[in-house]
């Protein structure tokens, strides 16, 4: 297992920061990624986490949900009341941007390549592995600059993924 040479604070400091003319955001380079896995029980925890986040947070945030598909608009509306960060629903793929929250459709996972998030539709045993799949992809792409968070989960989904994030030098939280 590789040990990180960066402190937790250094992992979230901006590298390649854009000029102040662009509002401090470099929309074409994502150095930090926060991935969160949760099921229906995570709404309150997400509201508590996001209520104090600054709009210029130097990371993109991705949330994988175990919720019925019809509940995504309600989830977005509810979370939006507590959060300063814009929330983007990802249907197929989107360019990651720091200071934004990305949410794939419930029951789907995500993969990360070249600054993009892509919805993964064809994972076997989808309901049992959506969080694991996203965490593993984040660990491969972002290594020590990823934070993996499990709030609530469906069975063991998230366990293997958190191990991958930890093994890549990232931070893990449950």
Image (spheres, rainbow, N blue to C red):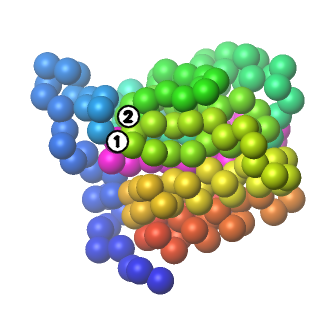
Q: Name the spot of residue 97 as percent of width and height, x first.
A: 39, 31
Q: Does 164 sit above or below residue 81?
A: below
- Left or right, 124 with respect to 52, comes to right
Residue shown at 29%/38% (left/top)?
A: 29
Residue shown at 48%/61% (left/top)?
A: 140
Under circle 2, the secondary element is loop
Marks 1/2: CA–CA distance: 6 Å
Residue 39 lies in the magenta-colored region: yes
Residue shown at 18%/43% (left/top)?
A: 16
Decide if residue 163 is in sight here.
yes
Stretch of the chain drawn in magenta: 30-49
Q: Which mark is residue 18?
A: none
Give the quadrant of residue 148: bottom right
Residue 36 lies in the magenta-colored region: yes
Q: Which residue reaches farthest bottom?
A: 1
According to the image, label 1 marks what residue? 30
Under circle 1, the secondary element is loop
Q: Name the spot of residue 106 as percent of width and height, x first.
A: 76, 33
Q: Residues within 10 Å of mark 2 (few under 14, many from 20)?
A: many
Could you tell me if the residues under marks 1 and 2 are in contact, i.e. CB atoms within 8 Å?
yes
- Left or right, 126 with respect to 47, comes to right
Q: Which mark is residue 98?
A: 2
């Amino acid at each position: 297992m590789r040990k990180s040479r960066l402190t937790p604070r250094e992992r979230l400091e901006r590298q390649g920061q854009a000029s102040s003319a662009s509002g401090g955001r470099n929309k074409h380079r994502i150095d930090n990624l926060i991935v969160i896995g949760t099921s229906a029980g995570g709404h309150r925890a997400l509201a508590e986490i996001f209520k104090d986040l600054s709009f210029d947070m130097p990371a993109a945030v991705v949330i994988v949900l175990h919720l019925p598909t019809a509940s995504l608009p309600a989830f977005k509306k509810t979370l939006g009341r507590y959060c300063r960060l814009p929330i983007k629903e990802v249907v197929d793929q989107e360019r990651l941007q720091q200071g934004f929250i990305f949410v794939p459709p419930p029951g789907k996972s995500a993969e990360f390549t070249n600054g993009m998030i892509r919805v993964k539709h064809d994972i076997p045993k989808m309901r049992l592995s959506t969080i694991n799949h996203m965490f593993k992809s984040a660990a491969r792409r972002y290594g020590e600059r990823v934070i993996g968070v499990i709030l609530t989960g469906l069975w063991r989904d998230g366990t293997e993924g958190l191990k991958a994030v930890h093994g890549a030098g990232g931070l893990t939280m449950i």
